[in-house]
């Protein structure tokens, strides 16, 4: 009876972990749960009591945290095999479903890539509409100046500041910003996965 109660407690914990394993395939979820079950059983070393199981689970942490760390580790492993911008962004999207840091990383990455694309579009569009595309400075009615990068309906008082140099400037800015955004995504995914390693070591039987 004691063993049955201990196993029921373990299975309840694993089911709670399962509910938080968003972003993983069914095969990956089964692998995570099998790994966790094996670690806990090794930790108790045959002493199958509710108290020993509770102690082993307490060392693991909450089901939500255990799930988050497992997802982060596996997503990071996939990312390391494909560190293209799309591969990194896919990893960030998956992690956005399991942690606040993942959500923040996703929105920062989205903003960075969109801004990078905007710079490249301005550079590419300049040859097709040179009279309207540029870096525009326009006087405000109440004093001061407003600045617009892109296209405007040119007013007599507006002044285009960069001319054709806007093409290499925007291309360089877009590429540099895309690289910085990519680097930020790689670093953030690695940081979210790195916190898993010490906890896993703690599960090893003494």
Image (spheres, rainbow, N blue to C red):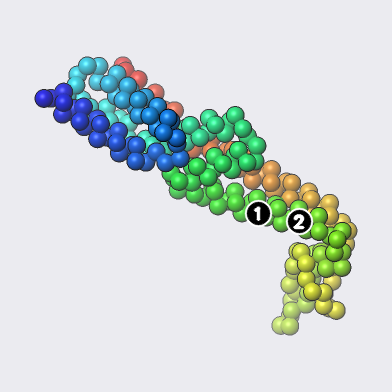
Residue situated furthest bottom in the rendering:
141
**Residue 99 located left or right of residue 88:** left
In this rendering, the answer to whether 41 lies above or below 157 is above
Q: Nearer the viewer, residue 195 or 107?
A: 107
N-term-proximal mark, 1 vs 2: 1
Residue furthest left as drawn: 1
Whether residue 32 is visible to the viewer of this picture, yes or no, is no
The residue singled out by tag 2 in the image is 121
Cα–Cα gap, marks 1 and 2: 10 Å
Where is residue 63 shown, x and y percent of the image? 32, 38
x 54%, y 48%: residue: 106
Circle 1 residue: 114
Relative to 13, is 51 on the left or the right?
left
Work out whether residue 57 can be spotted. yes
Between 193 and 198, which is closer to the camera in this rendering?
193
In the rendering, at what x and y percent does residue 80 appear? 58, 30
Q: How many marks?
A: 2
Q: Residues within 10 Å of mark 2 (few under 14, many from 20)?
A: some
């Amino acid at each position: 009876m004691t063993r049955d109660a201990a196993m029921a407690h373990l299975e309840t914990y694993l089911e709670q972990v399962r509910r938080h394993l968003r972003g993983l395939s069914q095969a990956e979820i089964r692998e995570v749960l099998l790994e966790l079950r094996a670690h806990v059983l090794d930790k108790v070393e045959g002493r199958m009591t509710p108290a020993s199981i509770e102690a082993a689970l307490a060392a693991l942490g909450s089901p939500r945290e255990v799930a988050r760390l497992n997802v982060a580790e596996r997503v990071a492993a996939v990312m390391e095999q494909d560190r293209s911008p799309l591969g990194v962004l896919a990893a960030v999207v998956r992690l956005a479903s399991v942690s606040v840091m993942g959500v923040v990383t996703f929105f920062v990455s989205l903003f960075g890539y969109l801004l990078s694309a905007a710079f490249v579009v301005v550079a590419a569009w300049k040859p097709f509409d040179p009279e309207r595309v540029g870096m525009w400075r326009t006087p405000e009615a109440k004093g001061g100046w407003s600045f617009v990068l892109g296209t405007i309906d040119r007013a007599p008082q507006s002044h285009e500041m960069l001319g054709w140099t806007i093409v290499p400037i925007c291309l360089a800015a877009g590429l540099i910003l895309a690289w910085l955004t990519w680097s930020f995504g790689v670093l953030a995914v690695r940081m979210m996965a790195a916190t898993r390693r010490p906890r896993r070591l703690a599960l090893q039987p003494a």
